[in-house]
Structure formats: structure tokens, C-alpha cells
Image (spheres, rainbow, N blue to C red):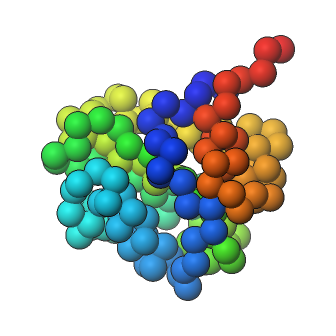
């Protein structure tokens, strides 16, 4: 699986404490704002708009909230492991405990979709999600999410 080159070491939250979906999205927006310099309200609103179309909870305890933003110059990723799972209205109705926030520049087009597909593939890699759930260390979580694929 390809390296997630749009994930920075500072964009890793190994034990985020939230009480629900709305608070999770607010926390992700706040952290993304700190790292991108964009207003957290703009990020949060972009995430909410996308969630209104349908949950970004893809199943198996995983959600990939995403959106496009003016003022963003490159694709940005942030991974969070929740202290306790929350209802995210996921496709399989299971609570979510692993979130990968993906933000793209407004005109990203196909690059945004490619990045989204890549994140989904990485998170479904056999054994990866168990390793994510087993760590509470930011460096270890970053290493898990960015390691180079193993040779077959």
C-alpha cells in the first residue's frame, strides 16, 4: 500500500476524547486549523456539509470525514484514534473509533478522490486497523499510517 505522504507527524491524535460525532468533527477541525492556518469554523462547516450528504463512516469502526476548502494549497490528512467509540451514523451502524480527516484544495478534483480512495485502501489493509487500535503513541501511530509497503 502506498505511503500516505499527505499525513504530517504533527497530524496524529492517538487518544482523542470526544462524546459524539459533532464533537469529534469540531476537534478534528480545530486540530486541522492549527496545522493549516485556516479558520476552524470553515473546516468544520465543510465537514458538516459533507456529512449532510451521508455519513463518512465507512464501516468497521472507521470514518473518513473530508471536504474541500478555499485557501488550502495541498491535500492535508489527520488521523485520530478515539479513546472510546462514538456513534457516527456509519454505513454498518457500528460506532467509530478511527477517523482520518482529509482536506483538499477547492480545485483538487480527481486528486481529492484519489487521496480518499488511497486512505480507504490503507485503512482496510489486513492487520493495520488492529495495530492502530492497539497504540496510544503518536509516533507509533504515524509510523503505522506511513510505513512503506512490504515487498511481496
Horizontal side of 124 relative to 32 (left or right) equals right
For the C terminus, give its image quadrant.
Answer: top right
- Residue 78, above or below 149: below
Q: Is residue 19 above or below residue 131?
A: below
Identified at 61% across, 45% down, the residue is 142
**90 and 121: which is toward the camera:** 121
The answer to which quarter of the image holds residue 65 is bottom left
* Furthest residue toward top: 152
Q: Of all residues shown, which one is farthest toward the bottom?
A: 19
Residue 144, quarter of the rendered image: top right
Q: Is residue 47 visible?
A: no
- Whether residue 143 can be seen here: yes
Front residue (pair 102, 147): 147
Q: How many marks?
A: 0
x, y percentage for residue 108?
A: 27, 33
Instruction: Name the residue nearer the viewer: 119 or 143.
Output: 143
Q: Position of residue 150 (x, y in %)?
A: 78, 21
Residue 24 horizontal side relative to residue 48, left or right:
right
Q: Residue furthest left?
A: 71
Q: Which residue is pictured at 54% across the width and 33% down the height?
A: 4
Q: Position of residue 75 (x, y in %)?
A: 35, 38
Please tell me which residue is depicted at 35% across the width and 29% down the height of the picture: 110
Q: Is residue 73 above or below residue 101?
A: above
Please state the horizontal and vertical placement of residue 14, each as a whole percent of the image. 63, 61
Classify the position of the N terminus by image quarter.
top right
Amino acid at each position: 500500500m502506498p505511503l500516505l505522504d499527505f499525513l504530517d507527524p504533527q497530524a496524529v491524535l492517538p487518544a482523542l476524547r470526544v462524546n459524539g460525532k459533532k464533537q469529534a468533527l469540531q476537534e478534528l477541525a480545530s486540530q486541522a486549523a492549527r496545522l493549516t492556518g485556516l479558520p476552524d469554523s470553515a473546516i468544520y462547516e465543510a465537514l458538516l456539509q459533507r456529512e449532510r450528504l451521508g455519513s463518512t463512516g465507512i464501516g468497521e469502526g472507521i470514518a473518513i470525514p473530508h471536504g474541500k476548502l478555499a485557501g488550502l494549497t495541498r491535500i492535508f490528512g489527520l488521523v485520530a484514534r478515539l479513546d472510546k467509540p462514538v456513534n457516527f451514523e456509519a454505513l454498518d451502524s457500528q460506532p467509530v473509533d478511527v477517523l482520518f480527516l482529509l482536506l483538499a484544495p477547492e480545485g483538487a478534483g480527481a486528486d481529492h478522490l484519489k487521496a480518499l480512495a488511497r486512505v480507504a485502501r490503507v485503512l482496510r489493509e489486513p492487520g493495520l486497523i488492529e495495530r492502530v487500535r492497539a497504540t496510544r503513541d503518536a509516533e507509533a501511530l504515524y509510523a503505522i499510517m506511513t510505513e512503506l509497503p512490504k515487498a511481496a
